[in-house]
Amino acid sequence: CIRDRTCGFAIKVVEDEINGVSDNPVVLTRNKKILSGGNFHGEYLSQASDFLKIPLIKCGIASERRVAHLLSGKRGLQPFLIEGYGLNSGFMAYHYLIASIINDCISRAFPASLINISTCNEQEDVVSMGPTAGFNLISIIENLRRAFAIELMLAFQAISLQPVTPTSYYLNYLKRCYFNPPLSKDSDLMSLSRKIENNLDKIEDACSRILSRILKKEFK
């Protein structure tokens, strides 16, 4: 829904505005010229950026909730995903981290396009605040990459604590690539979470291929 509806809408707005000839500079690549009548306005881009922030933050909230359940000690998993918890805190601190990340995202959710500060001796009396909307959107996306990397790291640890199943066989392959060996005592995990974050695109592609294989086997 987010990809097809919300992102699709935002992409269309960006494409329309970039290719528009009424309110934006016209870029002529063949002649290597940029023509502008000075009628540009970033309102549509600003509103699209503000709109896109909402479902992205909801994805982050869902990620934090999954992290909370992974750390809760339920479903046969050890609390904080570590053996001997009490002596070891395991991944407890990562719940604080992802909570702060999502809180930062929520603090950026207010629509920048609603704010107006007139400039240029009142000539620019209604402004879009598009750069602020875009900056907040980029910050939210970067935050969510960190949040998803944390969730994935915890999921890999949870898999390590469970018996291998036909489905988890594929996930174990990913785990061996990006999370091996599993955590058995407290240690510095920041470099590991950064490694997962830096490889999120590769992991996403691998997950797509794995899901395709699983579905082919189930529906034969």
Image (cartoon, helix red, strand yellow):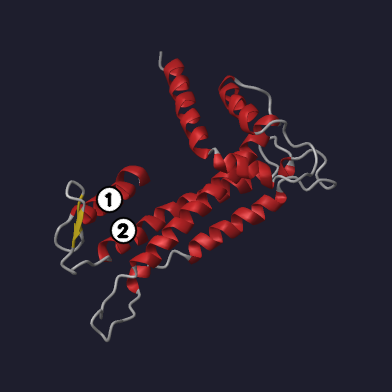
Tell which circle, 1 or 2, labels the residue nearer the N-terminal end: 1
Task: Tell which of 76 and 8 is nearer to you.
Answer: 8
Give the answer, above or below, for where 136 lies relative to 158.
Answer: below
Disc 2 designates what residue? Answer: 48
The residue tagged 1 is: 9
Q: Residues within 10 Å of mark 1 (few under 14, many from 20)?
A: some
Identify which amino acid the numbered label 1 is placed on: Phe
Q: Secondary structure at mark 2?
A: helix
Residue at the limit of the structure toward the bottom, as seen here:
121
Residue 66 lies left or right of residue 31; in this view the side is right
Q: Position of residue 178 (x, y in %)?
A: 62, 33
- Which quarter of the picture shows residue 131? bottom left
From the viewer's perspective, tell me whether residue 16 is left or right of residue 142. Answer: left
Number of marks: 2
- Residue at left offset 50%, top offset 60%: 105
Q: Residue at x 54, y 45 (%)?
A: 148
**Mark 1–mark 2 CB contact (< 8 Å):** yes
User: In the rendering, which numbered label is found on residue 17?
Assistant: none
Please tell me whether mark 1 sits on a helix, a strand or a loop: helix
Looking at this view, is 153 or 165 the one in front? 153
In x, y percent, where is residue 86? 83, 48
Is residue 157 depicted above or below 139 in this figure? above
Q: Could you tell whether 177 is left or right of 44 in the image?
A: right
